[in-house]
């Protein structure tokens, strides 16, 4: 009888611990989604304000150029459509999101300097800090998915896309700024999508 009570106690404690971990993991996921959603909204406002300050002809020319342009992060392997994203594992989506956020650590400093003098978007100098906070949160989620297993992702050992990409284009300052803002918005949209899908998948699995 005593042995049965001990076993029951162990099982109950184990269940409570697992529930606590699941609850904390869900909180971290929700927090990451909220953070990247804020960054995506900020990116959208930044580029909208930038376009509003352009002459009509400049706006038309830039809108034609960007869809054919290359972003720094395009060299990072990532799902290219809804079906591929849905089929990707939670861990893969988290790793790609981490990689995308990491690729903006250096360009975000240029981004802050580019927009701070001409746009009123709140505190653009905090963009780098917000990205770093999100990166840390995603890193914790990745560790939770690995659950003590070694990280075998080959992409983690690859160098980041060339960090001065947006500074060496040889374009006019207007085009450089527009490309920087457009790529930032594009990548934040990607990360938001990946984290939302991963969070939804995790909720269904649990």
Image: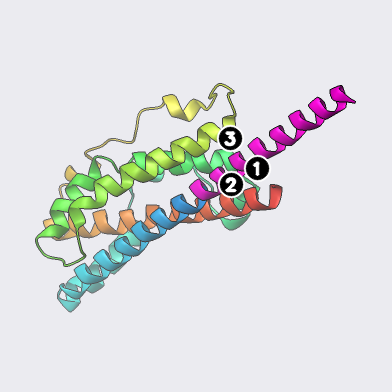
Whole-angstrom CA distance, mark 3 to mark 1, is: 15 Å
Query: In the picture shown, does residue 151 fall above or below 64?
Result: above
Residue 75 visible in the picture: no
The local crowd at label 2, few if under 14, some if 14 to 19, many if 20 or more residues have their Cα within 10 Å, is few
Whole-angstrom CA distance, mark 3 to mark 2, is: 14 Å
Asked which quadrant contains residue 10, the reply is top right
The local crowd at label 3, few if under 14, some if 14 to 19, many if 20 or more residues have their Cα within 10 Å, is some
- Callouts 1 and 2 close, C-beta under 8 Å: yes
Name the outermost residue toward the front. 2
Whole-angstrom CA distance, mark 1 to mark 2, is: 6 Å
In the image, which is nearer the foreground, mark 3 or mark 1?
1
Q: Which mark is residue 23?
A: 2
Return the residue at label 3: 145
Name the dominant secondary structure of the magenta segment.
Answer: helix
Residue 194 percent location from the top left of the image: 51, 51
Colouring chosen for the image of the structure: rainbow
Residue 96 percent location from the top left of the image: 48, 41
In the image, which is nearer the foreground, mark 3 or mark 2?
2
Q: Which residues are magenta?
A: 1-28
């Amino acid at each position: 009888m005593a042995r049965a009570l001990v076993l029951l106690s162990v099982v109950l404690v184990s269940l409570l611990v697992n529930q606590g971990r699941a609850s904390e993991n869900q909180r971290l996921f929700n927090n990451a989604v909220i953070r990247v959603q804020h960054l995506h909204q900020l990116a959208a406002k930044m580029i909208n304000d930038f376009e509003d300050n352009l002459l009509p002809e400049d706006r038309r020319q830039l809108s034609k150029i960007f869809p054919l342009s290359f972003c720094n992060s395009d060299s990072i392997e990532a799902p290219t459509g809804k079906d591929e994203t849905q089929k990707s594992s939670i861990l893969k989506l988290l790793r790609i999101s981490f990689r995308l956020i990491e690729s903006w650590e250096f360009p975000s400093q240029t981004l802050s300097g580019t927009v701070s003098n001409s746009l009123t978007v709140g505190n653009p100098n905090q963009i780098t800090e917000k990205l770093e906070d999100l990166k840390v949160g995603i890193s914790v989620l990745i560790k939770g998915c690995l659950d003590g297993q070694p990280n075998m992702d080959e992409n983690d050992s690859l160098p980041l896309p060339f960090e001065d990409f947006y500074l060496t284009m040889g374009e006019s300052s207007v085009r450089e700024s527009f490309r920087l803002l457009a790529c930032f918005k594009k990548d934040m949209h990607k990360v938001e999508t990946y984290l939302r899908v991963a969070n939804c998948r995790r909720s269904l699995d649990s």
